[in-house]
Amino acid sequence: MSRLRSQFLRLAFFSVFLSPFAGASDYIIRNVTVIEGTGKPAKPKMTVMVSDGKITAVLPAAASDKGGPNIRELMRSWTVDQVGLSTSILSGSETAAPKPADPALVRDVLEHYRTSWLKNDPDGVRACFTQDAVLMPHHGLEPIVGMKAINDFWFPPTNTRTTILSFARTTDEIEINGTRAYARGRSEVAWRVEDKGTSVDWRTAGNYMTILKKQADGKWLISHLIWDDLPNERKK
């Protein structure tokens, strides 16, 4: 309680420093969230009066917005005990910092993408992307926009069979900023194409950049995938 109140009073002094009423004995701090220790819901958008370094009254912002010369008297009618300010007060302008994003969650998506190709699992590959995802392929090809176009690009209906033989990837950098993240690295892939009784093996290697978006359920999905590599090399 003492630590939280000290934090709150520091905020009060900071507000006073910025206020044109810095010389007054009473200070009014708006947009405060009151949190009890009883399990009851928090009370947002409250207004707090601080007098001589102490919290003396709290009331809803709607009531304090009436303003006028009687605001201090009105606030004093709402005592700390009446609003249940028995455990802590946190300022609405100082929201709790979000938990740091975990790069491992991004790595999990990238690994699921890689292993789905190795399993030759189209559904697993598609599950790694948002529905409006964009592919920006190598060699200056036009962007592929949306899941339908991605499906037609990678998994078109054909009698030709393509099998991924190996797929190695490095993840050299991951950066997360809120609900967006990017990862970059290098990849090397080998595959076999079978058609009308013939079989040809190919390989290539190059760089990639992946942009991911965090979904409402907390899951990360690929929204953009960019890659560039050398021309396909036929394996002997």
Image: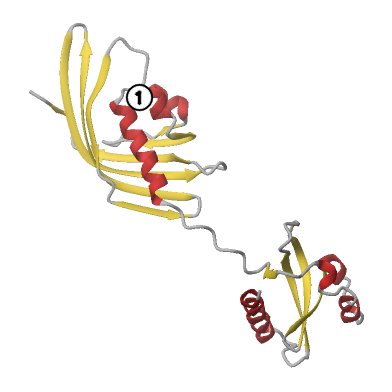
> In the image, is 171 to the left or to the right of 38?
left
Work out whether residue 69 or residue 90 is closer to the camera in this orientation and state it.
90
Name above or below for residue 232 compared with residue 48. Answer: above
Residue 136: percent from left, percent from top: 36, 37
Q: What residue did someone put label 1 on? A: 154
Name above or below for residue 192 compared with residue 31. Answer: above
Residue 20: percent from left, percent from top: 73, 87
Residue 58: percent from left, percent from top: 81, 73
Image-quadrant location for residue 115: top left
Residue 135 seen from this side: yes
Q: What's the amino acid at mark 1?
A: Trp
Residue 122: percent from left, percent from top: 38, 23
Question: Which residue reaches farthest left?
Answer: 236
Question: Which residue reaches farthest top?
Answer: 196
Image quadrant containing the C terminus: top left
Image quadrant containing the N terminus: bottom right
Element type at mark 1: helix
Residue under the point 21% across and 13% down: 194
Name above or below for residue 7 compared with residue 101. Answer: below
Work out whether residue 47 or residue 65 is closer to the camera in this orientation and state it.
47
> In the image, is 5 to the left or to the right of 231?
right
> In the image, is 162 to the left or to the right of 147?
left
Residue under the point 74% across and 62% down: 44
Residue under the point 71% across and 69% down: 87
